[in-house]
Image (spheres, rainbow, N blue to C red):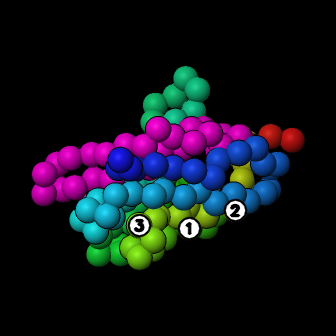
Amino acid sequence: QVQVEESGGGLVQPGGSLELSCVASRSIILTADIGWYREAPGQRREFVARVARDGAIVYADSVKGRFTVSRDNDKNTVFLQMHNLKSEDTAVYYCNGHLPIFNLDYWGQGTQVTVSS
């Protein structure tokens, strides 16, 4: 059973673009704030972007103007469009479904994004 599952990672050259998808269970997509996080080798997992249940969007400063997060509830999917990618964007990207009322978090297995020439 799918709770939260990411896809779309891969190898891209600096300056390139990539789109990640996060498919979530219906109950999660309708009730949770959906966030993207990333974890580079030897570093702590960090926040990237979030789209709340009410549509409010927040980005980390490091990705503002380059990344766009959106949600399509009909498709149970949240997207992360990434443009002008840099080597420092290389990381495993994780999707998170956060239910504030229960303080519950659902994490996917992650998808690898590698930016390299």
Residue at label 2? 83
Q: Position of residue 81 (x, y in %)?
A: 61, 64
Quarter occupied by the C terminus:
top right
Residue 38 at least partly seen: no
Among the 4 quarters of the image, the one containing residue 15? bottom right
Q: Earlier in the sequence, mark 2 or mark 3?
A: 3
Q: Earlier in the sequence, mark 1 or mark 3?
A: 1
| In magenta stretch: residue 7 | no
Q: Position of residue 33 (x, y in %)?
A: 31, 61
The residue furthest front is 1
Q: Nearer the viewer, mark 1 or mark 3?
A: 3
The residue range painted magenta reads: 89-115
Task: Identify the mark at residue 68; answer none if there is no mark.
Answer: 1
Q: Mark 2 and mark 1 in contact? Answer it, CB < 8 Å.
A: yes
Residue found 69% across the figure and 57% down from its top:
18
Amino acid marked by disc 1:
Thr
Residue at label 3? 76
Residue found 54% across the figure and 58% down from its top:
21
